Amino acid sequence: MKKRGFKGRGYNPYLLPPWLRKIRFFCKQIILPITIFQGLRTLFLPTTGDILFLLILAGLSYLFITDFI
């Protein structure tokens, strides 16, 4: 018999504990404005740390928008 991995089950955010769902919802609402602010800040005063932070925020924004997290 073939085992089914995580991909076969799909993702259901309602299986998470309530406190984790609240944190996820809050992060989903706040990540895009923070990413835009960091992008503008990086545009005017670019440093290596700002660029790396912007890349991390952009990746997290993409993952939240596509409901991967």
Image (tube, rainbow, N blue to C red):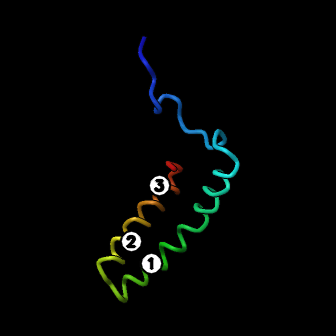
The disc, 3 or 1, on the residue closer to the chain's N-terminal end is 1
Counting from the top left corner in percent of width and height, residue 60 is at: 46, 60
Which is nearer the N-term, disc 1 or disc 2? Answer: 1
Q: Which secondary structure lies at badge 3?
A: helix
The picture places residue 53, in percent across and down from the top left corner, at 39, 71
Query: Answer yes or no: do the residues labelled 1 and 2 have beta carbons within 8 Å?
Result: yes
Say few, some or many: other residues with alpha carbon within 10 Å of mark 1 (under 14 / 14 to 19 / 20 or more).
some
Q: Residue placed farthest to the bottom in the image?
A: 44
* Three-letter residue code for mark 2: Phe
Cα distance in 3D space between marks 1 and 2: 8 Å
Q: Nearer the viewer, mark 1 or mark 2?
A: 2
Crowding at label 3, few (<14), some or many (≥20) Cα neighbours within 10 Å? few
Of all residues shown, which one is farthest toward the top? 1
Q: Nearer the viewer, residue 49 or 28?
A: 49
Q: Amino acid at mark 1?
A: Gln
Q: Which residue is located at x 70 percent, y 48 percent?
A: 18
Residue at left 53%, top 30%?
A: 9
Left or right: where does residue 41 sit relative to residue 19? left
Nearer the N terminus, badge 3 or badge 2? 2
58 on left or right of 25: left
Give the Cα distance between marks 3 and 2.
15 Å
Q: Residue furthest right?
A: 18
Residue under label 3, please give it: 63
Place residue 1 in its image quadrant: top left
Looking at the image, which residue is at 45% across and 78% down? 38
Q: Which mark is residue 55?
A: none
Q: Which residue is mark 1?
A: 38
Indicate the position of residue 27 as horizontal and vertical percent values.
58, 62
Report which quarter residue 4 is drawn in: top left
